[in-house]
Image: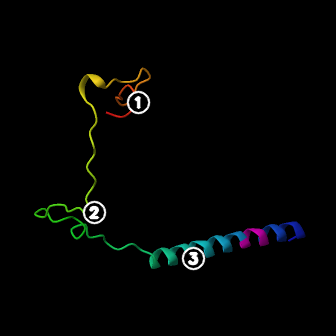
Amino acid sequence: MNNRQRQLLVVFLASMGFGLLGGLAYSVTSQMIRPGKIDLDRASPDPNSSPTMKGPPLPLQNRGPTGSDCVVPPGGGPPVTKDFQPC
């Protein structure tokens, strides 16, 4: 066996060793981190309960002029009054 063949054999065996070591590390870690079965029944809400709002109540919106005072701008968008206040 000449020097070139010996070098190729060393490179081949080293790459096979690294591949086997990587595969072993992958299989060990995937077994350690295996996800368990997820129980979705606990996460579903109770169908008999109604949703409740937490926190302070929302402020009431003061409605301005309605009807013919409101126009949609030429470029589109929400309706506004003549002084560009939202309706």
Residue extending furthest toward the top: 74
For marks 1 and 3, the one nearer the N-term is 3
Between 4 and 42, the residue placed more toward the observer is: 42
Amino acid under label 1? Phe
Between 24 and 80, the residue placed more toward the observer is: 80
The magenta region covers 10-14
**Residue 24 in the figure: left or right of residue 73:** right
Between 69 and 22, the residue placed more toward the observer is: 69
Q: CA distance from mark 2 to mark 1?
A: 30 Å
Residue 61: quadrant of the picture: top left
Q: Which quarter of the rendered picture does the C terminus lie within? A: top left
Q: Which quarter of the rendered picture does the N terminus lie within? A: bottom right
**Residue 8 in the figure: left or right of residue 77:** right
Label 3 crowd (10 A; few <14 / some 14-19 / many >=20):
few
Dominant SS type (magenta): helix
Q: Say which mark, if any, is on residue 56.
A: 2
Residue 77: quadrant of the picture: top left
